[in-house]
Amino acid sequence: PRGSLVLTSSGRLRNRARVALPPPMSQSQGVLITCDIPTKQYILFLNEEHKFLIRDLDDTHLFIDASAVKLVQEEIKRFTEENVYTAPDEKA
C-alpha cells in the first residue's frame, strides 16, 4: 500500500497514514453513459445477457464497451416505444 503525503505549514512533506489504493483501471476503449436511475437499471439488465459493462461508476453513470453503444441505444429506443404512453393529438 502507498502512503499519502501532507504538506505541512513549514513547507515540508510528511507521510500520513498508509491507505490501500484500488488497483489501477486497465485501459479500455469505452463510452461514458449518463442517464436517470431507471434507465441505468434497464442497461444493467441488458448487460446480464450481453456483458458490455466495464464499470458501474455511480447512480447515474456507467462506463461501457464502445462496441455496445448501438445495441444499448436500439434497446432503449425499443423499450421506450413499447412502454411510454404518448397521448394522441387532439384537433380543435
Image (cartoon, helix red, strand yellow):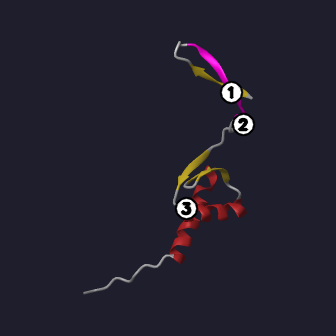
Mark 2 surroundings: few (<14), some (14-19) or many (≥20) residues within 10 A: few
Mark 2 and mark 1 in contact? Answer it, CB < 8 Å. Answer: no
Q: Which residues are magenta?
A: 12-21
- Quadrant of the snapshot with the N terminus: top right
Q: Residue furthest front?
A: 9
- Labelled disc at residue 17: 1
Mark 3 and mark 1 in contact? Answer it, CB < 8 Å. Answer: no
**Gap in Å between the C-alphas at discs 3 and 1?**
36 Å
Amino acid type, label 1: Ala
Identify which residue is drawn at 56% across, 49% down. 32
Give the residue number, with chain letter if any, for mark 2. 23
Q: Earlier in the sequence, mark 2 or mark 1?
A: 1
Left or right of residue 38, residue 48 in this image = right
Identify which residue is drawn at 68% across, 60% down. 47
Mark 3 and mark 2 in contact? Answer it, CB < 8 Å. Answer: no
Q: Residue furthest bottom?
A: 92
